[in-house]
Image (cartoon, helix red, strand yellow):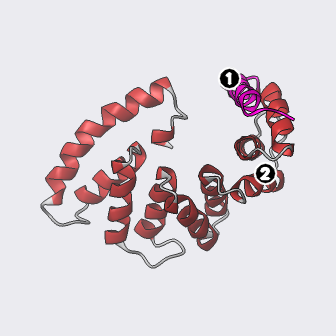
Amino acid sequence: MTSKLDTKRLLDDAYRQYRKGRHEESVSIYSELAKKGNADAQRFLGWHYLRGFGVTKDQKEARFWLQKAADQNEPMAEWFLGRVCFLENDYKGAKGWFERAAAKGFEPGIHWLGRLYRYGLGVTRDKKKALELFKDAADKGNLRARMEYCVCLILGYENLSGIPKGICLWIKTVPEVCKIIFNDPEDWRVI
């Protein structure tokens, strides 16, 4: 039986291996923990299969592991499943997964739910709802949501008085996003 401390150490090691580009080593560790039911490992293993990091890209296997993690209410896995559905143009499926992640306060889930409403994908287009969702995710720290919020303000989704607010917020946001992307393009605030 692996203790919580040992599991944490293994997860940290797997992530370090991933960040160093040692994907096969990362997959090996995540696989071991995923098979034992660890939701974090299941999510990361699903991500590896989704992206083809250290394994052959396999959407069916990715879904399998992401579903295992989502079954344990892991919000990032729910969001990943929503992204898979989104990429497959299954917007109703994406909405369901994004709503589950958003209900847990997971910023990318809120942001992507806003995208569905902004573009009317699988839902009736609702600019006001999109704006609310982008603002909510932005207020929780998601910079991509803040950028979409700015764009929507600039496009007049709120009203004409929102345009200058959107421009000012955009000017403030872009340098923050660039700094993060150059340092860590996988930072949760910009996904």
Pick out the residue farthest to the top: 20
x then y, percent, for residue 154: 23, 56
Taking the spot 36% from the left edge, 70% from the top edge, the residue there is 129
In the drawing, does residue 185 fall left or right of residue 144? right
**Callout 1 amino acid:** Arg
Q: Which residues are magenta?
A: 1-22
Q: CA distance from mark 1 to mark 2?
A: 20 Å
Asked whether, in this view, residue 98 is left or right of residue 146, the answer is right
Question: What residue would you read off at disc 1?
Answer: 16
Query: What element does badge 2 sit on?
Result: helix
Please, what is the three-letter code of the amino acid marked with disc 2? Trp
In the picture, which quadrant includes the N terminus? top right
Mark 2, residue position: 65
Image-quadrant location for residue 175: top left
Q: Tell me: 129 left or right of 27.
A: left
Q: Main secondary structure of the magenta part?
A: helix
x and y percent of residue 40 in the render? 70, 42
Image height check: is 14 above or below 158? above
User: Is residue 166 found inside the magenta-colored segment of the image?
Assistant: no
Q: What residue do we see at 12% from left, 60% from top? A: 161
Q: Is residue 143 left or right of residue 74?
A: left
Residue plotted at (31% across, 70% down)? 128
Question: How dense is the environment of label 2, judged by Cα within 10 Å: few (below 14), some, or many (20 and up)?
Answer: many
Residue drawn at point x = 72 percent, y = 47 percent: 39
Task: Please report whichever mark, 1 or 2, sits nearer to the chain's N-terminal start.
Answer: 1
Indicate whether residue 11 is drawn in magenta.
yes
- Compare residues 127 and 33 and report the one nearer the observer: 33
Badge 1 crowding class, 10 Å Cα cut-off, few under 14, some 14 to 19, many 20 or more, is some
